Image (cartoon, rainbow, N blue to C red):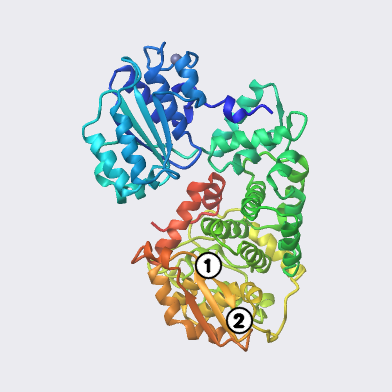
Amino acid sequence: MIALARKYRPKRFSDVAVQSHVSATLKGAIARGRVAHGYLLCGPRGVGKTTLARVLAMALNCEHRGEDGEPCGVCVSCERIWSGASSLDVVEIDAASNRGVDDARDLRERAMYAPSGDERYKVYIVDEAHMLTREAWNALLKILEEPPPRVVFVFATTEPQKIAQSAAPVLSRLQRFDFKRIGPAEIKGRLTTVLANERLAAEPQALSMIARAADGSMRDALSLADQVLAMGDGRVTAERVREALGLVPEDEFLALLDVILERRAGEVFTFVGRLADAGIDYALFLSGLADILRAQLAVLLGGELPDLPDSVRHALEERRTRWSATDLLRMLSAIGELEPRFRKSGQQQLLIETLLVRFALLDRTVEIEDLLRGLSGEGNESSAAKGRPSNAGDAQRPPRRDSAPRVTNADVQPASDRPVNDERPVVSRPAAMADVARAVDPPPRQSLGPTPEPLDLARVAGRWDALVAQVRSDGKRVLASALEHALPVAATAAGDLTIELDEPNEFLSRAVESGKSDIAATLRQWFPDTRTVRLRHDPERAAVAPTRVTSEMVRADRLNALRRRDPILGAAIDALDLDVIE
Ligand SMILES: [Zn+2]
């Protein structure tokens, strides 16, 4: 096995190209002989903090250092430091395992010893520095207040805010650098170079998959490539990557798209059960689902496609006219909302099931403004129609006047006062295709009058969009907006339902708390045995809850975040001519 992760660990500042803002500054400091006594390197895992600390130690102690401050990378000193072999002058400490005060005292005593030679520097690299105790920081503060000559401390951390809490005085003595997260394109670029250098064949799509799975960590990306190479004949193929990472094959995703398109909500559970049996990673499944929806959106809008096998590209082309861009955006937005709390959740399977059931039951006639604004005006025919449990309105729904879906602030420009059709360019209307398709072949839904059902978590989740719509058409618009940010998390046979907000928000909590009996009353239309509705608060998350945030702000934030995350989404939002609320 080649161990690319090790072989390609940078030996020079210029190798750490992605963090050039940090490496160039450190290199310059060395060239000019102005090295600080303490550095704080902050950033997510795997972005090169420890690597750069080692390069710094190499440069300080190199026997043939360049005038520009670069270490030679090959002298005995460089070799030893780079390989992590014991070096008298570089001490690496993992604070996660040595956080006690004794170690700090020990550190202090050892720091008092001079480096091993006149020309040399002693460098302490403290990893996971946020794990150090307050006592340890106090001991370190004493050293940093009167630093011994030629001693440098480098603290690396993924959570600088914790250091700010426990060691604020120390922070003022450290020069801080923030490392940036490494994007999939940068990771893919690096993988391509490394594999070409090793004369190893790789499918571009396979490298994209690795880059996404590495989630911002160059180290993980190279280790994953190592893993894939260890499986076979030295070729990196999409199939091997899928196998090594436990990814869901694309044809499964395509089958899932059909389940959603054809509203076969009941099949969601079989599908997810199959994933569970195959032992797939749900978090990777979720990002894979986002990828395929994004690719479908790109096909629909004629945007640039990510690396895809021809068979998938064809399959997406075939489905092109069956989707509306609005629906794809709604689903991507829902995934984007779920993702931050997904990894921490102990109920990943349930979250996936409820999400997919909601997708399969998605009312395709809803305008995006309903989704994003939430507070639609009365008389908005689509929101009024979608809410009724009977869905009888579906068939005779009047045609829409407003051609361009848009988001406006209802308070500024109420829907009813809006010019009937202002000068906005009429963009292509993929949604209309869905309307036509539906009129010809109405989806299999229950017709007149809901059948009473027992209260059950999956069923409630499946009815959630309808519940929100019903509450809204009952005139309780604030409550409806709050419920859009909530999900059912537990239901008992006795009829008690627990719901949770997708992020702590005082405004929305209050709306739900004061509307609990209304929610229960509405739910009884489908689930007559509903007794109580309870809002669960997550105390830990509530502690950092922002206050005085309005739902409009939440929504605008989300749209902006979506835009930033994804250029294709940004383009789609522009193409659909949405006004983002400032
Ligand atoms: Zn050297």
Residue 508 relative to residue 305: left or right: left
User: Residue 323 appears at what percent x and percent y?
Assistant: 68, 57
Identify the residue at horizontal 41%, vertical 30% (top origin): 91
Vertical side of 87 occupied by 520: above or below? below
Which corner quadrant holds the N terminus? top right
Mark seen at residue 370: 1
Instruction: Count the labels in the image.
Output: 2
Amino acid type of disc 2? Thr
> Residue 37, located in which quarter of the rendered image?
top left
Query: In the image, ligand 1 is in what quadrant?
Result: top left
Vertical side of 431 occupied by 170: above or below? above
Q: Earlier in the sequence, mark 2 or mark 1?
A: 1
> Residue 141, located in which quarter of the rendered image?
top left
Front-most of 23 and 122?
122
Identify the residue at horizontal 48%, vertical 14% (top origin): 76
Instruction: List the residue tagged with mark 2.
Output: 492
Front-most of 12 and 528?
12
Amino acid type of disc 1? Asp
User: Residue 18 appears at what percent x and percent y?
Assistant: 48, 31
Please indicate, yes or no, whether residue 450 appears anywhere in the rendered image: yes
Few, some or many residues within 10 Å of mark 1 (<14, 14–19, 20+): some
Front-most of 281 and 328?
281
Which corner quadrant holds the C terminus? bottom left
Circle 2 SS class: loop
Few, some or many residues within 10 Å of mark 2 (<14, 14–19, 20+): few
Residue 349 relative to residue 8: left or right: right
Circle 1 SS class: helix
Vertical side of 280 occupied by 190: above or below? above
User: Residue 212 appears at what percent x and percent y?
Assistant: 60, 42
